[in-house]
Amino acid sequence: MVDSAKLDLSARIGSLVLPYPTVGLSGCYGSGAEFAPYVDLARLGAVVLKSVTRRPRMGNPTPRIVHTPAGMLNAIGLQNPGIDWYLQHDVAKFAQTPCATIGSVAGFSVDDYAYVCERLAARNEIAAIELNISCPNVAHEGETFACDPDLTARVVRAARDTTDKPLIAKLSPNVSDIATIARSAVAAGADALAVVNTVRGMAIDIVQRKPRLGNVTGGLSGPAIRPIAVLAVYEVARAVAVPIVGQGGIETASDALEFILAGASAVGIGTANFADPRAPITILDGIIEYMVQRNVRSLRELVGAANTGFANINQVEGDEG
Amino acid sequence: MVDSAKLDLSARIGSLVLPYPTVGLSGCYGSGAEFAPYVDLARLGAVVLKSVTRRPRMGNPTPRIVHTPAGMLNAIGLQNPGIDWYLQHDVAKFAQTPCATIGSVAGFSVDDYAYVCERLAARNEIAAIELNISCPNVAHEGETFACDPDLTARVVRAARDTTDKPLIAKLSPNVSDIATIARSAVAAGADALAVVNTVRGMAIDIVQRKPRLGNVTGGLSGPAIRPIAVLAVYEVARAVAVPIVGQGGIETASDALEFILAGASAVGIGTANFADPRAPITILDGIIEYMVQRNVRSLRELVGAANTGFANINQVEGDEG
Amino acid sequence: MALASSISAVVPTRILDRSEVAHDVILLGIEAPDLVKKVRPGHFAMALLPGRQAAGVALGIYEAHGSRCSLLFFLAGDRTRRLGALRVGERLDIVAPLGNGFDCEGAQRDIAIVAGGVGIASVLLPAQRLLARGARVRLFYGARTAERLVEAERFAAEGCELLLATDDGSRGYHGLVTDLLAREEAPERILACGPTPMLRAVSAYAQERKIPAQLSLEEAFGCGVGGCWGCVVPIVRTSAQAPSFPPSEADGSDVVHARVCAEGPVFWAHELRW
Amino acid sequence: MALASSISAVVPTRILDRSEVAHDVILLGIEAPDLVKKVRPGHFAMALLPGRQAAGVALGIYEAHGSRCSLLFFLAGDRTRRLGALRVGERLDIVAPLGNGFDCEGAQRDIAIVAGGVGIASVLLPAQRLLARGARVRLFYGARTAERLVEAERFAAEGCELLLATDDGSRGYHGLVTDLLAREEAPERILACGPTPMLRAVSAYAQERKIPAQLSLEEAFGCGVGGCWGCVVPIVRTSAQAPSFPPSEADGSDVVHARVCAEGPVFWAHELRW
Ligand SMILES: Cc1cc2nc3c(=O)[nH]c(=O)nc-3n(C[C@H](O)[C@H](O)[C@H](O)COP(=O)(O)OP(=O)(O)OC[C@H]3O[C@@H](n4cnc5c(N)ncnc54)[C@H](O)[C@@H]3O)c2cc1C
Ligand SMILES: Cc1cc2nc3c(=O)[nH]c(=O)nc-3n(C[C@H](O)[C@H](O)[C@H](O)COP(=O)(O)OP(=O)(O)OC[C@H]3O[C@@H](n4cnc5c(N)ncnc54)[C@H](O)[C@@H]3O)c2cc1C
Ligand SMILES: Cc1cc2nc3c(=O)[nH]c(=O)nc-3n(C[C@H](O)[C@H](O)[C@H](O)COP(=O)(O)O)c2cc1C
Ligand SMILES: Cc1cc2nc3c(=O)[nH]c(=O)nc-3n(C[C@H](O)[C@H](O)[C@H](O)COP(=O)(O)O)c2cc1C
Ligand code: FES
Ligand code: FES
């Protein structure tokens, strides 16, 4: 039996090596500090910060959260103090986080992304940059940059030009063919991909006869979307060779291993922290137990291990019908 | 208080008027007869039959069903006897169904749809035709007709040319902008839209390290996808003026009313029949109770009643972040 | 291929008793007097979970006597766990009886019942019926460990001869129950229920020796009532069935996908084309 | 805006007692000796549901005495129903104590506590503390019906004067609790917890009369610990806070979105810009 202390659990994102494959997700994990009373942050691979934009944003009106079967809708609206205030007041604190801190950048134009990315990436406290290209783009009627291979490439290329730090493009599940978007992001210089952001959704209050979110529509996260996210990872892993941070409904080690077997090198935990803030640790422990029991020395042996091509020719004509 | 016997619960699909807005969904409801021991089919608006294709299809290898959080994946693969055998042996039996029977047509080319639609629609037992354009299209690498506005229009137009019976186009949620597909289907002659089919997904067996479905990927249905489906209905209702058969995760009257308030004229019940075959009746009874309590005489008063435009300007820049 | 669904109904029951017969194995007694009258050996039920967001669970009907039926099940995943959390006195609706059931009326008098794991839940009623008809019934019963050989004594008490096997040798024969079967005197007839690999071995054994064998299959179910085509198995379509059974994809082939819940769950070994 | 989260932890507790104090209203006693020592009036907890596929539930800490705390909650939806299904002896993990809490140390001695519906769960500890300091505490308590005025007698027993109101007039004043408040002698200070419309009315009343008022807000929560920005309320950013509190969107505006779970749930009426 392999010794659990000797396991290689590391995950690489460009030049950044995370000692553990578990990541606290953007918008769900504060700056990490909010969860420090409940978990040992040193046992996380990284924390991805809440997305920051060029200018301050108050975000959407409440309600911003609605619980749905095995999941939740959120419509925060990228509340954040803007990059100036952020650099001046917040970023220095991240130096104390006992794991890697990954910055997240959002914007409404290619130029926004480049501008914020350059300023944020210049800071030592920030180990890598994630481009949240899954927020609505005013110029494209509710569709996001990540719904279009061309816009995806333009944002990634513009950001790439501003920094040598590892760059992660965060993809949207709201597309027909995520592999094409993934190829486009990688061709434009992304070192890794976060797969996937929330699925667009809505809930209606039948008593008041109006949408339940202040913003009308929101993003669905949690176990409900896990099968959607696992497939997205599987398809992206078959299309590109860069590391994937799998995410979407991971609650347990078993869930995390589904993503890893589908092709993810690391796994992100968002909504599950709201059900139990100890989730990233219990998930890590469960992954270790799985590896020990099966004599798997390095997590890399498992990455994509279920990604063995389609099962048979039925797939070609196969269907969900 | 309005008398429950005097309520107008009808829903119109082209020239077809359903006395009740509740529909047993394609592939989930057999020919209706399978559920006759458990429900009074005369209290359903209609049954949509399993999709039929030009040639017989054995369908996918098992497992075809995997249960997931608040939902399930299926990959049946359109098992059916082919239109010849179907017309000869099955269709005559549908005359006994005590509610309207809607045929469902699937295919792998525009010509397939037109051919099967013409032959099926010619039969008196069939009250309307649904075009299942959400099955993978061999010519387009796993994407379906319903992922492309142009292919959608071509299938609908070709089918339209073969029959005057009410024609329903069944849309896919696996798109970035469902409103565009809806406009295209309606412009090509669809009398109504079924919104939406299953969401593509996958699950992995971490013990055996392989996909859990025989077909690798499948379609996610059930309450997990409800918020996705409600939004799809909401967006389609804002884009086109034809009736919508809302579906995706409806389990209770409250769920059904969400779809109606979002803009659906009728509601489809699929996966919920597997949890309780009485679902269509309890849902109908719940809708009646809601209307009686609120003095709503006609269901039409509720259709789209929550579809009042976006709540505020934040929507423009708003976001799920 | 007899269809039971015409007599099936949604049956509201109440939980009479509940015991954990082994770790993670639950026996639920339910009050269902009308069902007792209708149920035949090999029938199954779809247990409708209370609350929302779950599909029904396919379970064999283990016992049926007086006004009580029972369900014997393993806590395998979310749905069986929810079922296992029910308490005495609570309500449980089931759809039953379903499936075609075992034919227990044949002329043969030396019968082997082969059960693997949870398959035991579907063979008590056939055992009782066969014993009542005066047959000799040997129960070949395999499980992972001795602790998992649940209810073995119950079968002995009914009058079955027990032939037990465990994977770890903790009780009975150390090895596969189908190997044990092959070592013993051949029966005139076989009834089997258990995991697919076990059933395949039983099928091979029976066909080699031309022993009539009925197998109750397990497959992932959607509806359980023939409405979704989720649960199929390849069988050969005999010319006698052809008029009532749809053709297969490949022209000329007589292999078709039958629904385990509606045409089965019990099939003759020689019908199957796994 | 004091932050309690620095002292909060995941607390494993055991259910000591459970009662349905009214239809669909549950009182759960939990064993949590360390928490009793830490908790202050107005703190809340995130109850972590056992099993999977659910977010935690934000609940006020109703009682805290000896080694027992309690939670009082309405069965509103899926999560509270799951919580309400827990049995005595079962385990329940909670994250607590959370939030800033009420300031009960002011000089004023004539205090009005205004509670609407489930808001009652957050005001027993402040009432006890104020009474212990010798204040006169009047509880203005409104609900839909008499049956929903749960635990009123408990507050009377503690020494509160009861001023009750029901929407249907089935007990006490027939009308809104805030109308009842306005009809009575003005207090020196107000603590309030209840639905937003009630809190708005309390706020208007208090500001008109320049009575200091603390309001405990309810908002849909994601994380409950300040990590998701799901639970905000618009407040005015005073210049004193500016250095530590991020700016708002509109240039020049001093209205910002504060997190109810982290900066609250208790805010001064004059801070809020609803
Ligand atoms: C006709 C018939 C009769 C039956 N009779 C009985 C009976 O009498 N007693 C009985 O106990 N069972 C019986 N079964 C089987 C029973 O229906 C299933 O075990 C049950 O449906 C499981 O439901 P679940 O939600 O609890 O488990 P599921 O969650 O559906 O899991 C089912 C199986 O998949 C595995 N699994 C779950 N999640 C994963 C994952 N992420 N990766 C890999 N594997 C996973 C589980 O370990 C389990 O083995 C019968 C089945 C049929 C078809
Ligand atoms: C700081 C704080 C303290 C709190 N303390 C307490 C307390 O002590 N006791 C207490 O009982 N509560 C308290 N609450 C409220 C409690 O957290 C919520 O009621 C709880 O989260 C509800 O969860 P749920 O899943 O049961 O209901 P949910 O399903 O989340 O539903 C919540 C509300 O939405 C409504 N709703 C649900 N579905 C729909 C739909 N489809 N259409 C329209 N409306 C719908 C429900 O009727 C209900 O009113 C507190 C909240 C906060 C923020
Ligand atoms: C409340 C909330 C806020 C979020 N905010 C952001 C954000 O600001 N930037 C971003 O890239 N993703 C954001 N996300 C998406 C998550 O990072 C994650 O990709 C998604 O929720 C799926 O993972 P999960 O199911 O584990 O939550 C947010 C998600 C939630 C639930
Ligand atoms: C087992 C299964 C089989 C299905 N087969 C078909 C089909 O043949 N044709 C079709 O148009 N839709 C098919 N569907 C999709 C359903 O008709 C329905 O649109 C979808 O499941 C969403 O609704 P639900 O969540 O209520 O099930 C199938 C769904 C399931 C679960
Ligand atoms: S499970 Fe639906 S047809 Fe058998
Ligand atoms: S609920 Fe997450 S910040 Fe308040």
Image (cartoon, coloured by chain):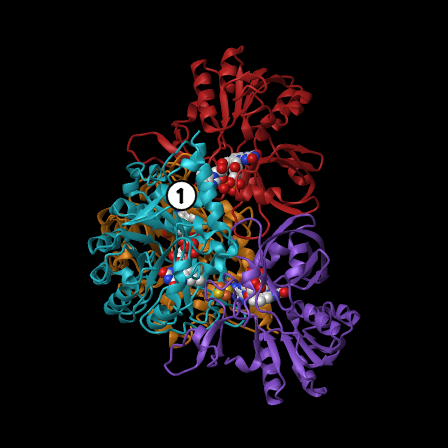
Chain colours: A orange, B cyan, C purple, D red
Disc 1 residue lies near ligand 2 with CB under 8 A? yes
Front in this rendered view, residue B234 or D98: B234
Relative to D129, B310 lies left or right: left
Front in this rendered view, residue B191 or D247: B191
Q: Where does the image place residue A74, in percent across and percent down from the top left? A: 41, 45
Reply above or below: A32 against D192: below
Q: Where does the image place residue C174, in percent across and percent down from the top left? A: 71, 81
Q: Residue under label 1, please give it.
A: B258
Front in this rendered view, residue B287 or D243: B287
Instruction: Tell me what residue is drawn at x 30 percent, y 37 percent.
Output: B308
Reply above or below: A67 against C161: above
Reply above or below: C22 against D38: below
- For the N terminus of chain A, the image quarter is bottom right
Q: Where does the image place residue C35, in percent across and percent down from the top left? A: 64, 58
Front in this rendered view, residue B204 or C233: C233
Relative to A257, C15 lies left or right: right
Total numbered labels: 1
Relative to D71, A148 lies left or right: left
Tell me the crowding category of disc 1: few under 14, some 14 to 19, or many 20 or more residues within 10 angstroms, Cα based: many
Q: Which amino acid does label 1 sit on?
A: Glu
Q: Which image quarter: residue C95?
A: bottom right
- For the C terminus of chain A, the image quarter is bottom left
Q: Please state the chain letter of the residue tagged with numbered disc 1 in the rendered image.
A: B
Of helix, strand and loop, which one carries label 1?
helix
Q: Where does the image place residue A23, in percent across and percent down from the top left? A: 46, 56
Instruction: Tell me what residue is drawn at x 45 percent, y 32 percent.
Output: B293
